[in-house]
Image (cartoon, rainbow, N blue to C red):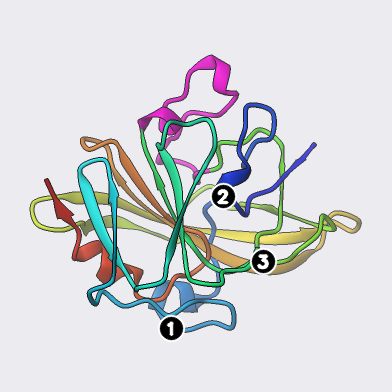
Amino acid sequence: MITSSLRPLTLTATALLAMTITAAPASALTGTTTADTAAVTAAAGKKVHFRSMTLTFPSGWKVVKAAGHGGDWISVEPAGCGTTCAHVQLVGPKVLKPGPEDFLETYETSRPFAPGTGVSTCRLTTGTKDGERFPDRKPVAAGTRKVGAGHTAQYRAWRGECYSMKTDKKTRTFVQREWYLPKEGILIVDSSGVTGLDQIVKAATWK
């Protein structure tokens, strides 16, 4: 079975989203711009409230909710975002520790966020010719990051790769980054290099 890793909106109990956290090009780690990466600043813009946290994205960005998770899984996307553009996922406890009826895997910091149980199609291309995987057992970067005042996240960056379903050869690479706040029950996922997200996360506010 092939499940799409591109849009959380497509999630249902039977149509699973298999998002992954991978190591993309070095640009995703350094914050430089890539061809299909939207530039992001922490300037005043669209405020997105998720549980007790608020992040401010540029004006025009939109919020897409994944079906069937009570608002505990959303995607924040640039205006005019296509199926392969970089986007941010905000994930809560209902997805991080799902019930047996959800058919999702429990999140663990020792591996990338990929709750689906099928093969995920490449997030950087359209169609189903390429799948994606995380070949490394260890992240390419790990540590802690500030998420607004008084809140610290466990930070991980995972190297991922797209591969031909026909030849099994690597076709593209990407980096998926995660900020996990276990006490607050929040996971922030950068799909493949959202420029400026570090500043947006640092500027988070809490209630």
On residue 124, which mark appears?
3
The verdict on residue 25 being magenta is no
Pointers 1 and 2 in contact (CB under 8 A)? no
State the residue at coordinates (22%, 48%).
53
As measured in the structure, the alpha-carbon distance from the residue carrying label 1 to the one carrying label 2 is 21 Å
Image quarter of residue 204? bottom left
Dot 3 surroundings within 10 Å: few (below 14), some, or many (20 or more)?
Answer: many
Specify start and end residues of the magenta stretch as a single range.
93-113
As measured in the structure, the alpha-carbon distance from the residue carrying label 1 to the one carrying label 3 is 17 Å
Look at the numbered disc 2 and give the secondary structure of its residue: loop
State the residue at coordinates (41%, 71%).
60
Tell me which label, 3 or 2, sits earlier in the chain: 2
**Taking 105 as reference, is 81 above or below it?**
below
Which amino acid is tagged 2?
A: Thr
Q: Residue furthest left?
A: 150
Dot 1 surroundings within 10 Å: few (below 14), some, or many (20 or more)?
Answer: some
State the residue at coordinates (52%, 76%).
37
Residue 15 is situated, as x and y percent measured from the top left of the image, at 69, 35
Q: Which residue is mark 2?
A: 20
On residue 32, which mark appears?
1
